[in-house]
Image (cartoon, grey):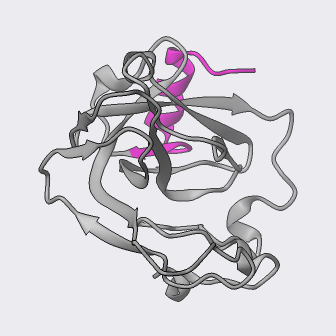
Amino acid sequence: MILPDHEIRKLLKSGKLEIDPLDPDQIQPACVDLSLGSEFRIFKHLQEPYIDARNPKEYTEVLDTQGKPFTLHPGEFVLGITRERIKLPADLAGYVDGRSSLGRLGVTAHITSGWIDPGFSGRLVLEISNLGKMPVTIYPGMRICKLLLFKLTSPAEVPYDKKPDAKYHEQDSVLQSRIHADGKTFNKTDQK
């Protein structure tokens, strides 16, 4: 069941769901609009012939625009981050999806990582691409995606915040892929 606006407001008021910062007008009929932060992770130009998913090198670097616009060129792919930090309880899951207005410009907000597990806490990293034929300028603070919330039939037995291999729990910056560490135990100090 997707939660409607009044249920979202009720959960926020009770503190069971956290989204910070949040303007009341970001709450839509069945979702919450999230805005773009000013930190991006861009791909370096390397001499490597490919990225080895099991043994990656530092193939990206962080770019903080400090609130300035970022121009996304055709075919370009970057990681971005939401301005808002969210915290889901064990009985709510989320899904992030792009906004139609940006999609009509050829800009996607995520490619595969739309799902947000119950118990997740942190800022959401977005997989942003320009599929169009012209450069598109995006702005920190602009609404970039929407968060849908789903009520589970019962709380998750082992929510994300209780999993020792939760690679992105409490993320507060744009982290590159950690697929090479599947099954590894993580903690807050691993968030680099």
Q: In the image, is residue 97 above or below residue 91?
A: above
The residue drawn where x is 18% and y is 58% is 65
Q: Position of residue 89 (x, y in %)?
A: 65, 49
| Residue located 27% across and 66% down the image | 63
Inspect the magenta stretch and tell me whether residue 12 lies in it: yes
Question: Which segment did they paint magenta?
Answer: 1-19
Q: Is residue 51 left or right of residue 36?
A: right
Q: Residue at x 75, y 76 (%)?
A: 165
- Residue 180: % across, % down: 72, 78
Residue 8 placement, left or right of 38: right
Looking at the picture, does residue 169 appear above or below residue 14? below
Quarter of the picture holding the N terminus: top right
Who's the residue at 56% across and 85% down the image? 57
- Quarter-of-image position of residue 53: bottom right
Looking at the picture, tell me which residue is in the foreground, 111 or 120.
Answer: 111
Query: In this rendering, is residue 177 above or below 189?
Result: above
